[in-house]
Amino acid sequence: MTTSSEQMVWHGWGDPARRSGLPRAAHALLRKELRLRETTVMPVAESSVLMRPPALPAAVGEQLAAVVGAEHVRTDAHSRLLHSGGKSYPDLLRRRTGDAQDAPDAVVLPGAHDEVRRVLEVCAAAAVAVVPFGGGTSVVGGVEPLRGRFTALISLDLSRLERLVRVDRASLTATLEAGLRGPAAEALLAAHDLTLGHFPQSYEHASIGGYAATRSAGQASTGYGRFDDLVVGLRVATPVGDADLGRAPSSAAGPDLRELFVGSEGTLGVITEVTLHVRPTPETTVYEGWSFRTFAEGAAALRHLVQGHVAPDVARLSDEEETRLTMTLAGSGGFKGRLGRAYLRARGHAGGCLAIVGWEGPPTAVRARRRATTAVLKSAGGLRLGEGVGQAWKHGRFNGPYLRDDLMDHGILVETLETAASWSSLPEVYRAVAEALRGAFAARGQSAIVLCHVSHLYETGASLYFTFLAAAEAGSELDQWRAAKTAACDAIVASGATITHHHAVGTDHAPYLGAEVGEVGLTALRAVKAALDPTGILNPGKLLT
Amino acid sequence: MTTSSEQMVWHGWGDPARRSGLPRAAHALLRKELRLRETTVMPVAESSVLMRPPALPAAVGEQLAAVVGAEHVRTDAHSRLLHSGGKSYPDLLRRRTGDAQDAPDAVVLPGAHDEVRRVLEVCAAAAVAVVPFGGGTSVVGGVEPLRGRFTALISLDLSRLERLVRVDRASLTATLEAGLRGPAAEALLAAHDLTLGHFPQSYEHASIGGYAATRSAGQASTGYGRFDDLVVGLRVATPVGDADLGRAPSSAAGPDLRELFVGSEGTLGVITEVTLHVRPTPETTVYEGWSFRTFAEGAAALRHLVQGHVAPDVARLSDEEETRLTMTLAGSGGFKGRLGRAYLRARGHAGGCLAIVGWEGPPTAVRARRRATTAVLKSAGGLRLGEGVGQAWKHGRFNGPYLRDDLMDHGILVETLETAASWSSLPEVYRAVAEALRGAFAARGQSAIVLCHVSHLYETGASLYFTFLAAAEAGSELDQWRAAKTAACDAIVASGATITHHHAVGTDHAPYLGAEVGEVGLTALRAVKAALDPTGILNPGKLLT
């Protein structure tokens, strides 16, 4: 058995052998447009990373060992380093420069729900902070080992909770333990010819519990639904007892308390099992590329699709900048032929926008749905680019985080953030956030590249996913990052959109939760927190500040 | 301007002129099968109804008048009587026999959100209980004027909150005030060629705020979604301030606090505005009848429909008993021809089950969807009965509550209750609840008729809606009702289903909320209640006991 984090390099994403390096054309483009100096900025050696000495009182360590077994209480430097934060740009920056001062005092790996509950009892009694740790893929500081008012902190690694507990084929539900990562969960379900259909970019490492705790959305969520839509039931260990929620497909028995624990980011309890709506493994999957003359034209097409109930399962639309960079990055890769500039120019689509649409399911249904989607996209001005483009997207769909490591090696700041808004406010939110990002870098005398795509469709609106790049400001990288992040968040709040569509709150967005839910909302959340976690040990500094 | 309740007779449902009387054949059947004695049990005269003297302190009355205007603080007997409870069988029984002892001390009608908030401030300061009152159609004791530890109580009638605040056509959302009843809301939306598509049996009188506060489900909710699915945003007045929730079609910004106020049944705050997902007014609506040999065969067909993503918008399936009674009640009405016994017998469908399916939308979409549904229903053993049956259902879809008044006049106990469960547990839940109901009456030496239909489809399960009838036990009607209700609720809890799919908790189901959400769930709810309603004035005795 391996912990999820053991498969991830401590200073980057996943398995370094999977990295393919920055394509030469892309590097040239970035060097020019970001006015990049010729530096490489590599991570320090693991042995040079600074980490505070472990401070877990010996008696507590013994109590924890009595619960989970001595071999599952780890205090070695490597384990602590692997749990010293998530995978955000600031997280990686800190670790790459050798700063893991805040590493947890111990990593504790319970093997069952009851062990989780007893670990919480031990920690509540001993005033030890607990950071629940699933895949460790948070990009918003969700697993940062913040001690708050506590002197000791453990990382509660859930990777031993990796069982498929139950399958109900007739009801299309499956109960999965929280520590299962995406591929392991899919493998267990595939044995029953079932799938979750949940494929976020973090899929290869993120966990079932993490998906639920952060309201994850995947690349096919337009079709399968967001992860919160898939949650039928939950088992949660809290310091005051267990919660078992979800007795029916739907209920009118008061407030939906599942929705209180889903998205609670480890602050109200530890999700140990999730009962999920699953689907038959699709017999066919088809992904294809489309081009639109402008982002606005493409967005209108997607709106017509979803409001006309003919949305595909995968629907994403890059803006002009993201399309341009995608085509450059593609180089001699998959994006050839119809994505060639000459082809597009001849059809009035030069400088246009790339869309990826995809359908999954039985062949007859896929055919019929594809026909319906196609009719709408064509009449909305779309130009079909074919399945080659779709296959290229599919091939690289989980590679973004690897590319980030390459970019950071080249001294490039690279970050993503996302939001969602109603269709009518989407153009203004798009403009405001992109301008805020460009403005924040311009104020520091820097050039930035700001990319955006629409990634999830709803009848009432859509999400916007931004990627931005700039030459990292050597020595003040975190200030630089913070200035851009703050500008974007302020713009999101001012435009009335949500502070996060699927990355969650963590520490990065915690200052904005008040703007999202208001003082009464915060009062309600704090009241629940005080009632379920009276000593406040659960994930200090996340969600609620 | 009229209050919603003014259109409802105080001892029954709606406008008495709409009642059509019990068909002769139905009366004969019930007389025989329920062993009914030849009695009629009519309501007492309004002047004989007993009501405690109004106890609102004069100073509080003046403060409330200063907020809403003196003409909107009503203490006359008729207003108090109209707000002395909802429309459950026990509610009506009590009022018909002249018992409105618990009537509120005053009925207060605020005209705007800010007035609601100020009314709450006055009542919190003066320790006066507040029962939010929308359409007053609760069938679970949701608007019962229970005083709890308070000596005075007002009914907060929201019917003056009747504006369409905003329409966002591009995003398909509309913001409606809470006091709007179904038909008024639809009329305002129809001017924009939009609809909510929300048509519960209580549609003619239930309110937008009530729908949200109780997680209503309508007859077309399989297609349009339950009311909680339609809620994009909420404005809520609480004793500690306002909550404005919902900034995007979807969000990962922590727990979904909309889901805390949706279903809160007036115990956490007063919902004053709801932003809802609306749809274009359907150009076509088609409803038709189908027959299945058995309830199990029909349920399997519905499961295949919804899991194959070809569910109609309306889908309901009566069991053998409900079908039999429907055919008898139909008499010489709309259910002729293909629903004739000879036709069904010839096709092996004698004693079978009636299903109603319906599609709404653009003609081409309706045609295509109908074709897909039909293929599945046929291969699952269904026999098409045609649109005449569908039209007959549509014609009578809001008449059930009127029939109840007629039945009560004939000395018949008639009650409904509902639940939902996963597809795999549905047969056992069905069996257990029906047996519990029959057993409860048998234990009192009585015959009962127990009917059931499936009314809402989900990929993971469905709802079951039970109607039961027996000869009312003169003098101990409430004991008789309670025995049956308790037996059914116990069976629902024991079988793992939800205590309510769309009627909500109110007072009737409050004792079962612990079984639904567990001790930790109750702790969370109580904590929120204490934080938002510190004096506990909001709807005492509902939801949380």
Image: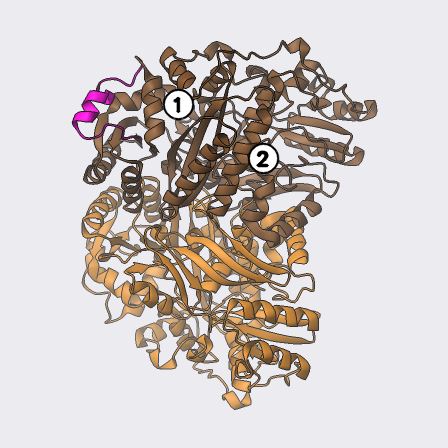
Chain colours: A orange, B brown
Residue A391, percent from left and from top:
24, 63
Residue in the picture at 50% in, 70% down: A112
Residue reaching furthest bottom? Answer: A47
Viewer-side residue, B373 vs A66? A66
| Residue where numbered disc 1 is placed | B397
* In the image, farthest residue toward the left: B346
Determine contact: label 1, label 2, CB under 8 Å: no
Instruction: Give the x, y percent position of residue A225.
Output: 39, 51
Find the magenta span and give its range. Answer: B333-357
Q: Which amino acid type is marked by label 1?
A: Arg
In terms of image quadrants, where is residue A39? Answer: bottom left
Asked if residue A90 lies left or right of residue B111, the reply is left
Vertical arrangement, residue A290 with respect to residue B120, above or below: below
Q: Which of the numbered marks, if any, corresponds to residue A334?
A: none
User: Quadrant location of the C terminus of chain B?
Assistant: top right
Number of numbered markers: 2
Q: What element carries label 2?
A: loop
Q: What residue type is labelled 2?
A: Asp
Q: Name the residue under label 2.
A: B508
**For discs 1 and 2, the disc positioned in front in the rendered view:** 2
Residue under the point 20% across and 59% down: A387
